[in-house]
Amino acid sequence: MDNSVRKVYADNAATTAVSEEVLNAMLPFFRENYGNPSSLYSLGQQAKAPLEQARATVAQCLGAKPNEIYFTSCGSESDNWAIKGAARAQRSKQGKTHIITSAFEHHAVLHTCQALEREGFTVTYLPVHEDGLVRPQELEAAITDSTALVTIMYANNEIGTIQPVPELAAICKERGVLFHTDAVQAIGNVPIDVKAQNIDMLSLSGHKIHAPKGVGALYIRSGVSIETFLDGGAQERGRRAGTENVAEIVGLATAMKIAAGTVEERIARLTPMRDKLIEGILKIERSRLNGSKEHRLPGNVSFCFQGVEGESLLLLLDMYGISASSGSACTSGSLDPSHVLLSIGLPHEVAHGSLRLSFGDYNTMEDVDYILEVLPKIIGRLRNMSPLWDAIRTGKVNYDEYM
């Protein structure tokens, strides 16, 4: 690839670069302040104090108490612990074996629920409709006397739709049901206060907010009964054994403080960029915005293009220096459309031609302009090679009802 090609990283929903502030905060804990925080001698205690300060920082960013924050290795671990731990505790103490989630959760939630189904739990998968939103009245109707837990993501990782979490959680509180949310995509993009919003458990991950990969956190409201995640030592108040990753925990807290303190600024900066992308991309013939235009993350756009295959689109964008993602995944030689796009009612043929562009702190309006310059050319090139596009253009195949 020509090194002179402009580079645009538009996959911030997948991961983000570690910021300079985060890196600088972490560095002392690799070679200077490297003690084990469980040790009694001074070097260990010098590591314990920053660890507990990081816990307090994360708690403050969420409106929680420090003793309600547990550090994990990632968002997926946090999801697994919250859902399995709470569901099994509810079954053991109250005999409740019903879980409610949505049809387009991250696989860390869906596969966890499926694993619990193999243990005898029943799971209701709420529809998310064409706009990618859970309906509060459908959640309320799904709750039964045996419902142990409701787990609904705060914002979808693929199409960026923001769920009415405060309303959903309020319903759960009124019915005496635990509410968990996967907020991995929402942190830094949506104002969150776990107490005001009646959230019982919340999962988050560091690498979506300019902290490193390999660190996350789980908020567990005081009084929530949950099984221990990892047996061993007494770390994380005996609920998750293993020597704490102090450097990355400090990095996570630093990133959380920055992200939570700049939510409104980020919304104000990214929303015009997002809206300009949406307006420009919708000018491409037979293009479709996936999910609600109003209730979506400020830096996320998700589109489908008739007559285009997602992987080819990504490869050509990469040749122009643009890093993006598709809802399709090449697995075992077969192209599987995104479960998220299928959940909002798209047929396989349309879902295959998906593109997600997700902006973050380092993107500019010039990035938007470059994408809008390059993308139509790429779509045209791919369609010129597509037999399906010929069939669509000549009217032999018609997917216009989905556009």
Image: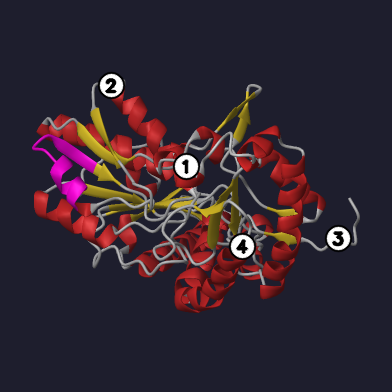
For residue 147: magenta? yes
Amino acid type, label 1:
Leu
Residue hosting label 4:
283
Q: CA distance from mark 4 to mark 1?
A: 21 Å
Badge 1: residue crowd in 10 Å (few <14, some 14–19, many ≥20): many
- Label 3 near label 2: C-beta < 8 Å? no
Mark 3 or 4, nearer chain start: 3
326 on left or right of 50: right
Mark 4 or 1, nearer chain start: 4
Mark 1, mark 3: which one is toward the viewer? 1
Nearest to the observer: residue 160 or residue 12: 160
Is residue 95 placed above or below 153 in the rendered structure?
above
Which residue is rendered at x = 50% and y = 44% of the image? 243
Residue hosting label 1:
341
Amino acid type, label 3:
Val
Asked which secondary structure carries label 4, the reply is loop
Is residue 270 placed above or below 295 in the rendered structure?
below
Residue hosting label 3:
5
Residue hosting label 2:
119
Which residue is rendered at x = 71% and y = 70% of the image? 369
Q: CA distance from mark 3 to mark 4?
A: 25 Å
- Label 1 near label 4: C-beta < 8 Å? no
Q: Which mark is residue 279?
A: none
Quarter holding residue 22: bottom right
Which residue is rendered at x = 36% and y = 37% of the image? 229
Amino acid type, label 4:
Lys
Which residue is rendered at x = 56% and y = 42% of the image? 327
Mark 2 or 3, nearer chain start: 3
Quarter holding residue 19: bottom right
